[in-house]
Every structure is written in C-alpha cells, then in structure tokens.
Amino acid sequence: MQVSLAGRKALVTGASRGIGRAIALALGEAGADLVLVATNEGLLEELAAPLREQGRTVLVCPCDLSDGEAVANTVKAAAKELGGLDIVVNNAGITRDGLLMRHAEADWQKVFDVNLGGALRVTKAATRYLLKSPAGRVINISSVVGLTGNAGQASYSASKAGLIGFTKSMAQELASRGVTVNAVAPGFIETDMTAELTDEQQGAIKERIPLGRIGRVEEIAAACAFLASEHAGYITGTVVRIDGGLSM
Ligand code: NAP
C-alpha cells in the first residue's frame, strides 16, 4: 500500500521543529503541497527549500497561534493562494511543567491558548475550505498524557485531553460532509520537547515503555500521512496511540 497525497493541500502547525517538521516532510514526500506554520520563519524556510526542490508548492507562514486575527488571516491567505485546503494538522504545542500548587495562572493560560486555542482557531478558519474538499482531513496531535495524566503536567495534560474532546466533537460536526477528524497521541518522542529530560529521567521512562525505547518523529509522521490519505477514509473520531505500548 502506497500513500499518495498528490494534488492535496496540507497545512501543518508547529512545522519548524520536531514532530511537525517530520509530518510536513512526510506529507510533502507523499505529494502534498504545504502551508508551513510556526513562529520561527527561518526554520520554516529551511524546511521549505528541499520540499520545493521535490516540486511541491510550499507557503511559509510565520504566525503566532495565540493571535486569533493572525490565524484567521494566515489560513485565508494560504487557502486563497493554494486554491483550497484538504488537510489540517494541528501539531503546535508547548509545555509549562510544574506542580499545580506552584503553577502560575499565566502559564496555564498560555498552554491552553496555544495547545487548544490554536487548534480551535486554525480549524475554525479552515473548515470552510475543508468542506469543499472531496476528502477533508483534520489531525490533532494530542499526547498520551491527555489519556493517562502525568504528575507535574496538569495544564499540559488537560489541554491534550481537551484536544481529544475537540476531535470527537468536530468529527461529529463534519462527518456528514466527508471530513474526518482524528487525534494522534504520541508517547515519548525524541524532540526538543523531551531533550530537556535528564539521562536518569529518560532511563526511568524507557523502563515503563513495553517496547523499551523512546519513539522517533518519523513514526508519528507516518501515521499522520496514513490518516491524511484515502486509505483512512472510514476512520474518524478516534485517538491513535503511538507510544510503544506505554498507555495500554
Ligand atoms: P517542539 O519540538 O517543542 O516543537 C513545537 C512546535 O510548536 C514548534 O514548531 C514551534 O514553533 C510550535 N509552536 C509553539 N508555540 C507556537 C505558537 N504560539 N504559534 C505557532 N507555533 C508554535 O515539540 P514536539 O516535541 O515536536 O511536539 C509537537 C507536538 O507533539 C506538540 O503538540 C506536543 O505537545 C506533542 N507531543 C510531543 C511529544 C514528545 O514526546 N515530543 C509527546 C506527545 C505529544 P516555533 O518555535 O517556531 O514557534
């Protein structure tokens, strides 16, 4: 089975680094034209160059997802330039970890604003284009801690659990128009976000993972390319766990 996204137009948030970058590369390699969103324009340009060499149309769209007006303008301008949107991957996310009793309200507001608010804003702005697509797709990058919780990550876990509720609601809102909406829940994946963990913390995490290792960004990206493809047309409202068995 080969995944082809030729002629499809995909917007990926948080595309400058880590999982989002890998997702953009996977969708581009499968043939999709791309809208790359994050705040670091330089990193987005670096990613765009090899994709353009492969013949893809790539729009670099620096945008802070906590700015509602900027998100609405970015999505509208990108869809106009590409002539529509078929796939949205809400991947951008941040953490502000710490025990709740010491957690500043400004920090949890920021986490909700980017992780959950960003996905709501992008999806809201993109829906009118997804409805016109022959096979619209929304993929929300949640987290295994949105299912299990995690001490020291109350706001992050709550935002990721919220994304799952959002996914199921949108799946029901858009199903009659053939748009599928799914969540992906990664476990521990090698990125800047997990690079902050000490060797000791990484060792302790690996001991809890049945497959005995941290995951790779390509393993999340491959699942997203599948969910974005025609092969996943009967999958909606689900949460795909990619965590080496951690949450089973
Ligand atoms: P990362 O390396 O820290 O990258 C985060 C991305 O989000 C960057 O591209 C960043 O771009 C973007 N971003 C952050 N704030 C933004 C804002 N206000 N506006 C626009 N873009 C913003 O994280 P990652 O590890 O790849 O994680 C990607 C997603 O997977 C996140 O939602 C995360 O919660 C989830 N996840 C990760 C893991 C893991 O183990 N790594 C596990 C489960 C879930 P700029 O810096 O350029 O703005």
Image (spheres, helix red, strand yellow):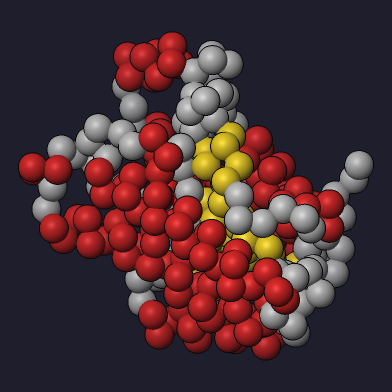
Residue at image coords 35%, 54%: 159
Furthest-right residue in this view: 1
Q: Is residue 161 or residue 243 the one in the foreground?
A: 161
- The answer to whether residue 72 of the structure is visible from this angle is yes
* Residue 18 position in % (x across, y down): 52, 44
- Left or right relative to 106: residue 73: right
Q: Is residue 125 or residue 216 the one in the foreground?
A: 125
- Residue 85's quadrant in the figure? bottom right
Residue at image coords 57%, 46%: 239
- Residue 182's quadrant in the figure? bottom right
Eyeballing the image, is 124 above or below 246? below
Eyeballing the image, is 59 above or below 52? below
- Left or right relative to 233: residue 130: left
Residue at image coords 71%, 74%: 176
- Left or right relative to 65: residue 78: right
Q: Is residue 170 or residue 7 the one in the foreground?
A: 170
* Residue 151 position in % (x across, y down): 25, 32
Q: Quadrant of the N terminus?
A: top right
* Residue 232 position in % (x across, y down): 78, 52
Q: Is residue 208 or residue 10 the one in the foreground?
A: 208
Residue at image coords 35%, 71%: 66
